[in-house]
Image (tube, grey):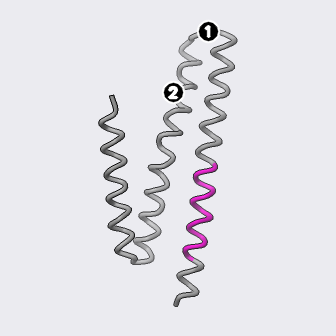
Amino acid sequence: MSGERDARLERLETTLGHLLRTGVMSAAACLAVGLIVWIAAGSTPLANGILTAGLVVLMVTPLMRVIVSLVAYARMRDWFFVTTTVLVFAMLLVAWLLRP
């Protein structure tokens, strides 16, 4: 039983690592391309859109990590971590919605 749980936690950590890496690299690529377009053409709707997409991807990445963790902990029936993850999710949403 403990071996299965350890294997699930290891898979979760690997999945979360891939998710975070993909999110950060995608955001960095969007921001780099947006910056290049902005330098080359000035403040155009295309440059602004690409830069905005990069920032949105960067902001959504931690939210996706929490959602993936929530699903994984629910499947493992680890209710302490489900509750903790729901609270973290709620705080992230509130912080994101209350931004100026």
Label 1: which secondary element = loop
Residue position marked by numbered label 2 in the rendering: 52
Q: Quadrant of residue 95?
A: top left
At x 30% / y 36%, what residue is drawn?
Answer: 98
Residue that extends furthest to the top in the rendered view of this protein: 42
Image x and y of residue 42, in percent: 61, 9
At x 58% / y 66%, what residue is drawn?
Answer: 13
**Left/right of residue 23 with respect to residue 80 in the rendered view:** right
Mark 2 / mark 1, whichever is N-terminal = 1
Q: Quadrant of residue 82?
A: bottom left
Residue 4 covered by magenta stretch: no
Label 2: which secondary element = helix
Gap in Å between the C-alphas at discs 2 and 1? 15 Å
Q: Vertically, is 61 above or below 73? A: above
Type of amino acid at the residue the image marks with label 2: Thr
Residue 10 covered by magenta stretch: yes
Q: Vertically, is 74 above or below 44? A: below
Residue position marked by numbered label 1 in the rendering: 42
**Left/right of residue 69 with respect to residue 88 in the rendered view:** right
Of the 4 image quadrants, the one containing the C terminus is top left
At x 57% / y 11%, what residue is drawn?
Answer: 43
Q: Vertically, is 14 above or below 23? A: below
Type of amino acid at the residue the image marks with label 1: Gly
